[in-house]
Amino acid sequence: QVQLVESGGGLVQPGGSLRLSCAASGDIASIYAMGWYRQAPGNQRELVASINSEGGLHYADSVKGRFTISRDNAKNTVILQMDSLKPEDTAVYYCNADATYSDRYEYTYWGQGTQVTVSS
């Protein structure tokens, strides 16, 4: 069992910045990758950025050069630094963790979501 708690969402003007945090607890040793997804009204949930246990990074093309994902293993926390925000970044952002058990089973956990609104 893994629990994910998100924070850092809010309202910002275009060109502004936000920092999202996701703290994992429970069986954190089972986690091999964490990331952030987002979903805007009427749209499907999409992957924004991810980081795995080896430090491998992935970014959606729409956020490359503007967003940065990082992880603090000591704090069991993953960070999404969002800069140069655009109105099209407006969405509910969800923290995600992928876990493996007994080198055999896999499971995906989700945070509750945090609203990011970019508007002038």
Image (cartoon, rainbow, N blue to C red):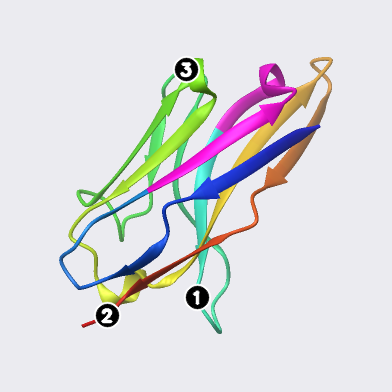
Q: Residue at x 74, y 33 (%)?
A: 2
Quadrant where the C terminus sits is bottom left
Q: Which residue is mark 1?
A: 40
Which one is closest to the eye, mark 2 or mark 3?
A: 2
Quadrant where the N terminus sits is top right
- Would residue 57 be counted in the magenta stretch? no
Q: Which comes sooner in the sequence, label 2 or label 1?
A: 1
Q: Secondary structure at mark 2?
A: loop
Question: Measured from the top left, where is residue 100 in percent x and y?
Answer: 75, 25
Q: Quadrant of residue 90?
A: bottom left
For this rendering, which residue is in front, 94 or 48?
Answer: 94
Number of residues whose C-alpha sits closer than 10 Å to that of mark 2, classed few (under 14), some (14–19) or many (20 or more): some
Number of residues whose C-alpha sits closer than 10 Å to that of mark 1, classed few (under 14), some (14–19) or many (20 or more): some
The span picked out in magenta is: 20-33
Query: Residue 119's mark?
Result: 2
Q: Which residue is mark 3?
A: 54
Q: Residue at x 71, y 29 (%)?
A: 99
Q: Quadrant of residue 13?
A: bottom left
Q: Residue at x 24, y 71 (%)?
A: 86
Mark-to-mark CA distance, 2 and 3: 36 Å
Which one is closest to the eye, mark 1 or mark 3?
A: 1
Mark-to-mark CA distance, 1 and 3: 30 Å
